[in-house]
Amino acid sequence: MKKYIYKVLSVGVFASLALSSCTDLTEPVYDAIPADQFLKTDAQIAAALGPAYGGLRGITWDWFNPSEASSDELIVPTRGGDWYDGGDWLAYSRHTWTPQHGPLNGMWGFIFGNISQINQLIPVVKTNQKAVDELRAVRAFYYFMAIDAFGNVPIVTDNTSSSATKTRAEVYAFIKTELESAIPNLVAGKSYSRMTKDAAMMLLAKMKLNAGVYSGAADWQGAYDAANAVIKSANGYSLASSTVSNFIVQNQGSGENIWTIPYDSFKAGGLNFHMRTLHYANAQTYGLGNSPWNGFCTLADFYNSFESKDLRQAMWIKGQQYAASGAALTDAKGAPLSFIADFQKDQMTDADPEFQVAGIRAQKYEIQRNNPNGDQSNDYVVFRLADAIMMRAEAAFRLGKTAEALADVNTIRTRSGVDPLTTITAADILAERGREFAWEGWRRNDMIRFGTFSLERKFMKKLDKTRELFPIPQPRIDANPALKQNPGY
């Protein structure tokens, strides 16, 4: 049984106070919970902070889609009459988005809407510094997404903050200070789905790993120290037997996952990668109550970067598809439903014979069989130990500690059954990060840091480094002229 803190429990508490005050008009009416009666236990703090966490479930759409579909590992081709949507999906893989791109406006709203909610919660819990610092750390995660996607954004911490654009370096300094100040006061042990000390330290490592991109000054030693602190944590995280076992339907038991966002097929929807990637007929393969949408797939070059003996190949769905009964499935035209790795067009019409089978599909998150709903019960993995090891490896490599970097990378490779490397390069580290963290939301971030995001690849010819930042959505500028558009837009 999963335990969810993402419930607006504080609303229920306030509501109960309001109802009790209505039964007897002579009783005093309270508009706040007295400090000596609430926020005294960790459970009470978790209940009060529920709204700050609930909004995170938007990450699987508003953050994941732009981050992955703009990279070299995921593409959403137009398939006949499906997945065109005004060219929005093609714009991701072609790097032709504009300030009018609707999904990017949604991404901005997801990030800053949740920042606003946290800003409203902080005064409510101001009597408890642990609660305040936990909220600051969660807000720092949203600001991490903002600085990574948009770069130059406002720093808003209350309703009196200026809404003017700050430089990316200023935002970086703000996030770093917030985390370093909050971390000592966060939950030290494991607390499922909470922004614990280890989770915040992972975020700090991620920030410092990208310091050169965000602030113009690298901090490889800081990234190394933060990642190493998580690896050496007293909480004793350990690598799972396989990468994909961290993403099973009931993955709350993983000893590798450090911070996850809970989902539930019935109670907490939003994790539906299977719907985005599977063919319509695959409902028969998995006994699904809803027909999938036949969209997301990977690119051939990325798929081919996996060795045949790599155990991480288990994340891919390829070749002929079958019903649960064993019967071979066909596409809508009666042709064999057999997924192919390479295809020649990213915008296919019904006349293109490959339009339904183009691209190898993904099951990084185990597909929940016989599920009557369109959402699954896997929890979304934000941070896990393998990432701490790979971040330490990259930082060590940049610091000239190549032997240590090689050992860390080979730890990850050995787990997946591929031969250890004997030498190591930056390209090796990027490639291994690609294979290990495929379809986890990190590929765009990694490619920008390694300088490959704006290099030509299949279906992407716009070699413009200004695309390493998304534009500030035009509707946001129209509403707030203090915002400054990013270069190139």
Image: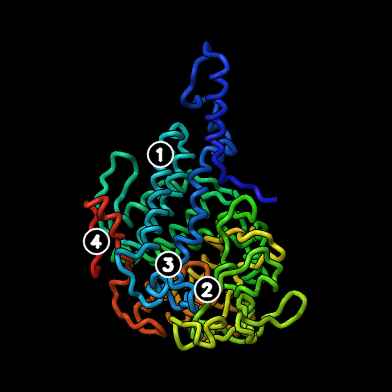
Res. 231 in view: no
The reply to whether discs 1 and 4 touch (Cβ–Cβ < 8 Å) is no
Q: Nearer the viewer, mark 4 or mark 2?
A: 2
Which amino acid is tagged 3? Answer: Pro
Residue 102 point in image, percent of width and height: 37, 62
Specify the farthest residue to the top.
26
**Side (left or right) of 233 relative to 323:** left
The residue singled out by tag 1 in the image is 120
Displayed quadrant of residue 416: bottom right
The residue singled out by tag 3 in the image is 66
The reply to whether discs 2 and 1 touch (Cβ–Cβ < 8 Å) is no
State which tag comes first along the sequence, 3 or 4: 3
The vertical placement of 459 against 210, above or below, is below
The residue singled out by tag 2 in the image is 295
Is disc 1 placed on a helix, strand or loop? helix
Cα separation between marks 2 and 1: 38 Å
Is disc 2 placed on a helix, strand or loop? loop
Tell me the residue at 46%/88% (across/down). 344
Tell me the residue at 40%/49% (across/down). 113
Q: Nearer the viewer, mark 2 or mark 1?
A: 2
Coloring basis for residues:
rainbow
Cα separation between marks 1 and 4: 27 Å
Cα separation between marks 3 and 2: 15 Å
State which tag comes first along the sequence, 2 or 1: 1
The residue singled out by tag 4 in the image is 485
Which amino acid is tagged 2? Answer: Gly
Cα separation between marks 4 and 2: 31 Å
State which tag comes first along the sequence, 3 or 2: 3
Res. 30 in view: yes
Tell me the residue at 37%/81% (across/down). 460
- Total marks placed: 4
